[in-house]
Amino acid sequence: MTAPATIPARGGDPPNPPGPPAGGPAVAAAPLLAALETVRDPELDEPITSLGFVTSCTVSAEGDAEIRLRLPTYFCAPNFAFLMVADAYDAVCAVPGVRRAEVVLEDHFASDVINGGVAAQAGFVHAFDGEAVSELHDLRAGFLRKAVMAGTDQVCRPLLAPGADPAGLLELTLGDVPPSAPLERLRQRRADLGLPAGDDAPLVIDPVTGARVSPDALPLHLRRARVTRISIESNGSICRGMLRHRYDSSGLGEEEQQ
């Protein structure tokens, strides 16, 4: 059997590269990690790689991939965990050359249920039979709306000079805003929800309806956006701290994303 291609955790020595299999070139592990960078913690709106959640990432020459994930605590919410494991499975399966994928969540009270449910592609309700009453589409949409609110604060705050009237934001479209990583992120989250995300779309919108925010509602809307951003960033810091306390190692991709 040909040795698997492996991405080691930071601090370890890289393995010897595998020789090419008789049937063709080996599948590289690096594209798998790149695919995992697209998987986000739904609550924190950050990639599982930058958060340190990816423990290992290997793939055999035949295209059998194995991903191992970890979370900050043993009792992290199982619905959040299920989303990340399922999204990781879908992302890895979409990589060219992967014929089979196994995503294993470790050290979690519901690991067996989550891992088995994702492997069987059974869905959250069937995986947690008798406990879950609905799939996680609404949960995902709710977190995306929070990401839109947080992104609104990230994009709008630099546009407001001290003492400036925030009402001027209502005249702006996404195309009026200078390009930036936060703006691109805001566009993506809005597009994920089916909200207007083109250059002609209003900068400040209701994350539920997609309608332009009215002048009367703008002050409260901007305060909510700021509180949401601060909450998400604070939770991210807490999760990183708990993960460092729980595990004395960095996850794959964690260093590169910071």
Image (tube, rainbow, N blue to C red):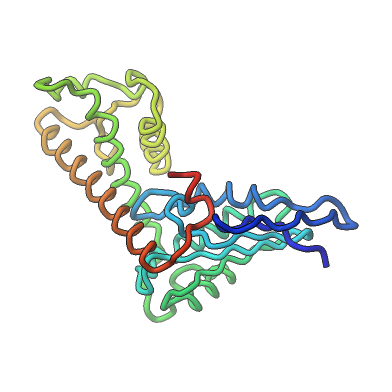
Q: Residue furthest bottom?
A: 130
* Quarter the N terminus occupies: bottom right
Provide residue 79's location: percent of width, then percent of height: 39, 66
- In this figure, what is the number of numbered marks? 0
Q: Residue at x 76, y 54 (%)?
A: 17
Is residue 75 positioned above or below 137 on the image? below
- Residue visible at 47% across and 44% down in the picture: 257
**Nearest to the observer: residue 139 or residue 8:** 8
Name the image quarter holding residue 82. bottom left
- Dividing the picture into quarters, in which one does residue 14 lie? bottom right
Residue 86 at x, y percent in the picture? 51, 62
Looking at the figure, which quarter contains the C terminus?
A: top left
Q: Nearer the viewer, residue 199 or 91?
A: 91
**Which residue does the image show at 9% across and 31% down from the upper left?**
216
Q: Classify residue 13 as left or right of residue 206.
A: right
Above or below, comparing residue 196 to residue 135 in the picture: above
Looking at the image, residue 102 lies above or below residue 195: below
Report whether 30 appears left or right of 228: right
Instruction: State left or right for residue 154 relative to residue 126.
Output: left
Outermost residue on the right side: it is 22
